[in-house]
Amino acid sequence: MVIAADPLLLGPVGLEIVLIVLLKVVVSFVLLMVSVMLMVWFERKLISDMQNRIGPDVAGPWGILQTLADGIKLFFKEDLIPENADRPVFKLAPYLSLVPAFLVFAIVPVGGDFRTGDGTVGLFGHRTFLQVADPPMGILLFLALSSVAVYGVMLAGWSSGSKYPLLGSVRASAQMISYEAALGLAIATVFLTGGSLSTHEIVSSQSGWNWNVVTTGVVPFLVFLVAGTAELNRPPFDLVEAEQELVGGFHTEYSSIRFALFFLAEFMNVITMSAIAVTLFLGGPDGPILVEQVAWVWPTLWFSLKVLAFLFTFVWLRATLPRIRYDQLMDLGWKVLIPLALGWFLLLATLNVGRDRGWSPLVVVFASVAVLWAGAAMLGGAVRKARAERLALEFESDEVLDAGDGA
């Protein structure tokens, strides 16, 4: 597939082009910051409604400025650094978590008509993509940056000079390794279907309701959703910040503006992960144009509504599901998600090969059933083994308790 380059950068790059690119960077950053502020308010209000509480209602109408008030309060608090901390690394860690979140958002197309046009919009007399950058390997860049973000968490825990943050950072590293593979396999099915790693081309290939959640099947979408939730350390996978076990987790020793940066990075990552999921599986800005007079508004509106649906899902999961045990977290990543994603990837590869080589429908069905059967057998064996090990551990613990009662 030929990768379409941003038409803004095809000709000579003068001062006007540079200013347009800088404008897109500034607008994207401001948009993301405002989205974070609204996301925090949305989560607090929604959870308070689910728990029959009032929630924030003082700062601004309906408490919408409460996040801004909290940020100002943290900015003026004292910035404490532990005595045993590695000061340079301790100061650097929050930025290593924050910067990748914005860089990922920069490659997401947030608008543009992909149904009747090429996804470009007019800006000061130039045609351009409604995204900061569209690198040919954009999705690989997303995977790389999502891996880099864990370095901020790891270094924050290690440099604090305290055992609780260190345990939280070790958990974060293990959790990222466990779920990054499943996340990559889910993305690989999109590449297998669309043939491109460019986010703009991925959205373009889904125009006209040809969304990847349908063409690749719902399994990669669900794997991406679960693995993405674990990558974000969101409930029920928030063992990195388990208060009952680790006080505050990796940011226990942080205060003032540095704590606010970690808080900001967490919600930035939630928004960017939602935007990536919409781009990969739900057509990005693709949607019907209901009013032709304001046709340019609808793609961005559809994109925003899809992202909002994901944000609601993350909040709903936090409000309804309890935190899972650490062994369940590892079992889900290694014994369920990875085999499931790998089996589905092989199934799609088999179907694509059969289609390209003109195999008869009977051969394609037989090959598909064989791949599904092998994957189900592997998955079932792993689940049965994990269940047997868990029952054995529970039996041993019961014996120990009975022996203690007898003594």
Image (tube, helix red, strand yellow):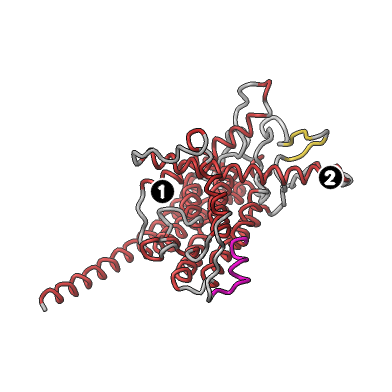
Query: Disc 2 designates what residue?
Result: 10
Label 1 sits on a secondary structure element that is helix
* Residue 382 seen by the camera: no
Q: Secondary structure at mark 2?
A: loop
In the image, is residue 34 above or below residue 299? below
Q: For mark 2, does the 10 Å Cα neighbourhood hold few (<14), some (14 to 19), or many (20 or more) residues?
A: few
Q: Which residues are magenta?
A: 85-95
- The residue under the point 39% across, 61% down is 243
Q: Is residue 303 above or below residue 294?
A: below
Instruction: Find residue 25 and report its horizontal and vertical position in percent.
Output: 72, 46
Q: What residue sits right under mark 1 in the picture?
A: 318
Prevailing secondary structure class for the magenta stretch in the rendered image = helix
- Residue 358's spot in the image, x, y percent? 59, 46
Q: Residue at x 31, y 62 (%)?
A: 384
Q: Quadrant of residue 377?
A: bottom left
Name the amino acid type tagged 2.
Answer: Leu
Within 10 angstroms of label 1, few (less than 14), some, or many (20 or more) residues?
A: some
Which residue is at 61% across, 70% downward?
Answer: 89
Observer able to see residue 225: yes
User: Residue flagged by tag 1: what amino acid is it?
Assistant: Arg
User: In terms of depth relative to the viewer, which is nearer, 162 or 314?
Assistant: 162
